[in-house]
Amino acid sequence: MATQMKPKFEYSEAEWKVRQDLAACYRIFDHLGWGESIYNHISVAVPGENDTFLINPFGLLYDEVTASNLVKIDVEGNNVGQSQYMVNKAGFTQHAHFHKHLGEKATAICHVHTTATMAVCSHKDGLVPTNFYACNFQGQIGYHDFEGVTVRAEEGDRLVENLGNHSILMLRNHGPVVMDKTIPGMFVKMWALQRACEIQVATLSQGEANVISQEVVDVHQRDLAVMASQGGAGVLDFEAWKRRVSKIDDSWQS
């Protein structure tokens, strides 16, 4: 494994840590097949700074993202770092609004267009409690009707309103937005949501599904909360996947 050296530009220790974790997250998403050409985004707030966040350089594939080429922008869209890359307006509009208005709740955010999650976002009933993973999210998802590509700032208020007190917003006919206080927490939530959607699509292709009762869903979520205390939400999962992608290519660290 390569030595984790900082590039010529100096960053605070805290920023360099989240840069590396965010770059690793892009590589993990790519490895899992969650990329979408040069589109879609994962962002993270910069520790100790007000209203600035890191996001992928527009034009690079996820397996080209590194800690040092991530773009630092403020919530008004200004490039406040050293990167010469531009940022996709659709990604900025959506992510900036969540970072600006939700604070710590939206420290880490991803938006994807995976086939399974887009299919469920396009289903009239959204995510249905037909499988283990889907039960994780019942009553914990907001839905937002499709308004076209998200480039208009005025849509941001409706996104926040429809999210409510949840941490997942299913953009109908589009794709999910998943957020958390940490990158590992966001990652493991996205992983479970992807599995829930894959299984729902497979289940409904067979015909009528066996829907799990709300009583059982409540018990499931209660017991999940106990399991979540083991190592912190997603930490062990995220570190395991970092090891996997590092064996393939550890250039994300630079």
Image (tube, rainbow, N blue to C red):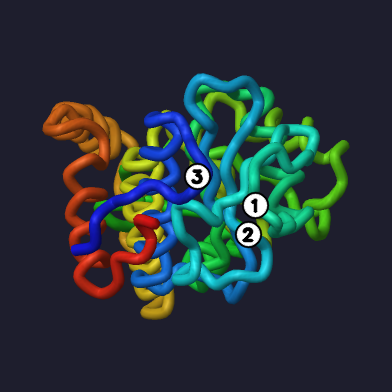
Q: Given the image, on which type of amino acid does mark 2 rest?
A: Pro
List x then y, in percent, for residue 194. Answer: 39, 60
Mark 2 and mark 1 residues within 8 Å of each other at the beta carbon: yes
| SS state under label 3 | strand
Q: Judge whether residue 125 can be spotted in this image.
A: no
The residue that label 1 is drawn on is 83
Q: Is residue 14 above or below residue 210?
A: above
Q: In which quadrant is the C terminus drawn?
A: bottom left
Q: Given the image, on which type of amino acid does mark 1 rest?
A: Ser
List x then y, in percent, for residue 150. Answer: 78, 52
The residue that label 3 is drawn on is 178
Q: Given the image, on which type of amino acid does mark 3 rest?
A: Val
Point 45% across, 68% down: residue = 34
Mark 1 or mark 3: whose residue is earlier in sequence: 1
| SS state under label 1 | loop
Density class for disc 2 (Cα within 10 Å; few <14, some 14-19, many ≥20) is: many
Mark 3 or mark 2: whose residue is earlier in sequence: 2
Q: CA distance from mark 3 to mark 2?
A: 20 Å
Point 82% across, 59% down: residue = 148
* Residue 57 image label: 2
List x then y, in percent, for residue 151. Answer: 83, 51
Density class for disc 3 (Cα within 10 Å; few <14, some 14-19, many ≥20) is: many
Q: CA distance from mark 2 to mark 1?
A: 8 Å
Indicate the quadrant where residue 169 lies.
top right
In the image, 129: left or right of 15? Answer: left
Q: In front of the other: label 3 or label 2?
A: 2
> Which residue is at the front of the view, 32 or 163?
32
